[in-house]
Each structure stands twice: as structure tokens, then as C-alpha cells.
Image (spheres, helix red, strand yellow):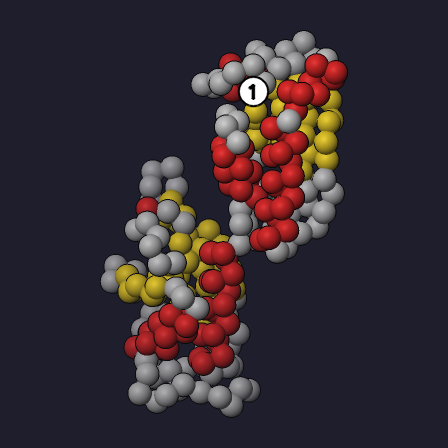
Amino acid sequence: METRSCSPELTVKEALTQALELYKLCAEWDEESSTVVAVPPGAEPWHRGEHLTVEPLDQPGGFERSAEEHIEGAAVILWAPDENGVQQRMRTIRAGRPGRFLEMEAAECARAASEWYTSPVPSQVLLEALGKMGLPAIRLRRKTIVPLEGEASSVEDVEQQRHLVITAESDADDRLVPHTGWSVWYLTPAAATPWLLFRTSLHLRSGQAVRADTLAVAAYIANYPVTAGKAG
């Protein structure tokens, strides 16, 4: 069992708040659900989008216990709104480890929350990179679609012209899944099968590497009309 402990004057809620603030995260107390919400500074109101909560494993009532005595562990939980805007519990980002004093648990929860917020979502990085290059794109069913003959208001419009489809072997919408590279496919309305143009094959975890790989794909797409004539 861990021997380090928090100040006997701190409650569990106060100890978790202090740990989050050390990692430059804001800790907000949600009265309705009686939990600590961890959000980055300047983020939109947490109840409108994805956010994390840090919760002692002995809820309810665990937040007001003495942090020095709390050895039940703490967990980081991801929440996200459903199609009706109602927040739903999605997954556990970091499971608690019972039998440890809260000082260590709080620090590890804060680090896990910070890493989650700062890790890039590959599909968002791709859309941002394409947008900065003036390339219209549509994200649909784990695919990014880029029309080659002008902007399109719907997928149906795109499918009536030459277009590129960018896919990933891993889930590009999940920031927790290691990025494994991109594939760029060329399609035409008359084509029976897509034509693979470009592929990266990597196993990346760092945000800098994910961005570099994605920018390389975006640059290839930006230059594609130069070679499209040769490709047909």
C-alpha cells in the first residue's frame, strides 16, 4: 500500500481540484451530478460537448471525505452528448486503483485528463489542414471525402464527380487509438473500384507525429490536380 498521503485538512474534492490545476486544467464542481468536471481553460461550457469527470470510486459522498483517509482510488470518465444533447457516460479513460492514498491517484488522474485533452483527433487535424489549404471536405462514416470538380453540398453531389476518399486503418475519430497512417483513394462516377493513390503506414502516438503525417497527406491532396490529368 502507498505510504504518501494528502494533507489531513483537505477533502477528496479539494485534493482532486488541486491536482487538476497543477496540470493547467480547470476543475468545476457540478452540483447536479455531484462530481468534479475537468476542462481546459477557455473551453466551451462542458455540458455542451465532450468532457471528463474525475470521480472517487466510493461515490456517493466520497468527495467530502478526508483526502488523507481516502484509499478507494479515483477514475477519469469521458462524457459526450447524444443526438438529443443529453450527456452520456462513454468510457473510462483511467480506471482507479484501490488501496492507494489519494495524492498519487489524484496526480495520475490529472495527468490522464491532460493527455486526453492535448492528444489530437486525427480526423479533425485532417479537416483543419485541408481547410487551411482551401480544400472542401466532407467527413462521413469514418471517411473524409474531397471533391475534385468544385464544392459539393452533399455526399450525393460528390459521388457524381471525380473525388478523393481518405481513410485510416485505425479509428481516426478517436484520440485514444494510435494513428496508423492514411490511405488516399481516387474515385469517379464510372469507376467500379477505387484506385489507391497514396498511403502512409505508421504507428504514431505523439501529437506532433500525427500532425506531421496528416499534413503530408493534405499537401499531397492539395497538389493532386497537377497529377490528376496523368492519372486520368
Residue 175 placement (x, y as % from top left): 55, 50
Residue 182 placement (x, y as % from top left): 67, 38
Which residue is at 32% across, 76% downward? 14
Mark count: 1
The image quadrant where one finds the C terminus is top right
Kindly give the residue lying farthest to the top in the view shown: 190
User: Can you tell which quarter of the image residue 30 is in?
Assistant: bottom left
How crowded is the residue under tag 1: few (<14 C-alpha within 10 Å), some, or many (20+)? many
Which residue is at 45% across, 71% downward? 74
**Disc 1 designates what residue?**
147
Front in this rendered view, residue 42 or 172: 42
Q: Mark yes or no: residue 137 visible.
A: no
The image quadrant where one finds the N terminus is bottom right
Q: Secondary structure at mark 1?
A: strand
Which residue is at 53% across, 31% downward? 133
Residue 208 placement (x, y as % from top left): 60, 53
Which residue is at 53% across, 74% downward? 97
Q: Mark yes or no: residue 86 visible.
A: yes
Say what amino acid the circle numbered 1 marks: Pro
User: Can you tell which quarter of the image residue 39 is in?
Assistant: bottom left
Q: Examine the rendered structure and indicate whether residue 207 appears above or below residue 13.
A: above
**Left or right of 86 in this view: 209:** right
Residue 189 placement (x, y as % from top left): 63, 11
